[in-house]
Amino acid sequence: MKRYLLLLFTVLMAFSIAACSSSPGGQAAGEAPKAAQPTASPKPTAPAIAASPSPDAGKSAGAAAQSPQPESKPSPSPSPEPGDKAAAGQSGESKPSPAPEQAKPQSAPPADTKPSPAPEPEKKAEPTPQPEAAKPSPQPEAKPAPAPQTDAKPAPASAPKEQISPKGKKLLLVGRENAPDDVVVSARMKALGFAVTMMIDRELTADATKGYDLIYISQTTNSKMLKGGVMKDVAIPTVYVKNHGMFYLGLSSVEENTNVMNVKSIDIVDPGHEVAGGLSGSVDIYKETNSKIGISYGIPGKEAKVIATAPGDKEKAAIYYYDKGTKADNGYAVKARISFFFLNNGLQENTTDEGWKLLDNLVVWTLQNG
């Protein structure tokens, strides 16, 4: 309510000042107006109401307007109190009420209004703590997936190579002319199915061996016929029953005196071999023995395969062979399978069935040319 009264009073004072400034006696020309002094604020107890000018005062003011008056500076005066306004009305003076300089409105704060607290100084924003980078979780060690179990049976081993049958194969038997030993051997080879051709040792040449499937060098062959190396370039499977022939090719390290006398058996050292034919241990190869009966032997190289030896002496090989493609200790390359058999001269009638069985098996084994 106080604010409304103060606003009303201010409006009235503004109208009074505007009226005074429009009169000629308000301000001399060219004079700078003096600074107005602030008027005292009215007391809030009694609202100040401007008194209306009396009729006499209006008349006096009209007379004064007709006669020129010296310029006078309006002197600011405080707002008249109610008592002063009454006195002025009684005196009848026609002095216009000086308008005070427009007062700046002062807004009084409400009685019950508390001053707003000063704003707190802005706090610096603390940096938001960054979360720690997530540590990579340890990856479980990848284990290979177990192979699925199958009921598949293992593939059967490859079928053994079909054995070459001696039937119809051409065999060249080389020995001394009309030797009874060779006649017996020839008959056995024919029984196996070979087509046998007899050749005298002095007629042996490399060219003469062409066209045959197997060559048999008898113990009756003169060693001189072999000494020149007639067989070194022959690529036909060959069975030697003459140690000299093995020596000349480098397949044995001894040439002469290669007999063990007064024996009637040999030792099977590879009983699982096909040539052994199920025989094992000490096997009698002669029906009887004496100082003139014995076996021949060789001392083969490291690539040879030994099947039987002299009784009690494993260094002396009684039955052994070299496969095609192997080498002798002197570097000679074997062109075809070459085998050795222990039989001596003139003992065809004294040989046991086991002895002949070993010979038959060795001949067929050599034919396979492994």
Image (cartoon, helix red, strand yellow):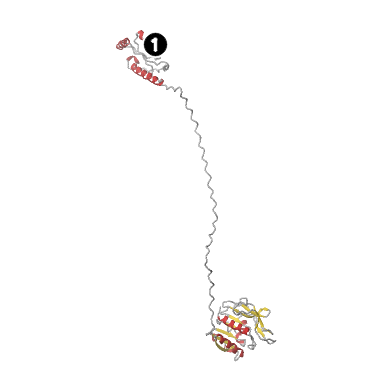
The image quarter containing residue 27 is top left
Q: Nearer the viewer, residue 97 or 55?
A: 55
Q: Position of residue 188 (x, y in %)?
A: 58, 87
Name the residue furthest right.
Answer: 291
Q: Is residue 26 visible?
A: yes
Where residue 112 appears, as percent x and y from the top left, is 46, 23
Q: Residue furthest left?
A: 66
Q: In the rendered image of this protein, does residue 40 appear above or below residue 217?
A: above
Query: Quick one: SS at disc 1?
Result: helix
> Closer to the camera, 163 or 30?
163
Judge by depth and name the residue closer to the eye, 245 or 122. Answer: 122
Question: In which quadrant of the rendered image does the C terminus lie?
Answer: bottom right
Residue at mark 1: 84
Relative image position of residue 237 (x, y in whole percent): 56, 82
* Residue ranking furthest to the bottom: 178
Q: Amino acid at mark 1?
A: Asp
- State which quadrant residue 341 falls in: bottom right
Q: Is residue 339 above or below residue 83?
A: below
Is residue 242 visible to us here?
A: no
Quarter of the figure with residue 141:
bottom right
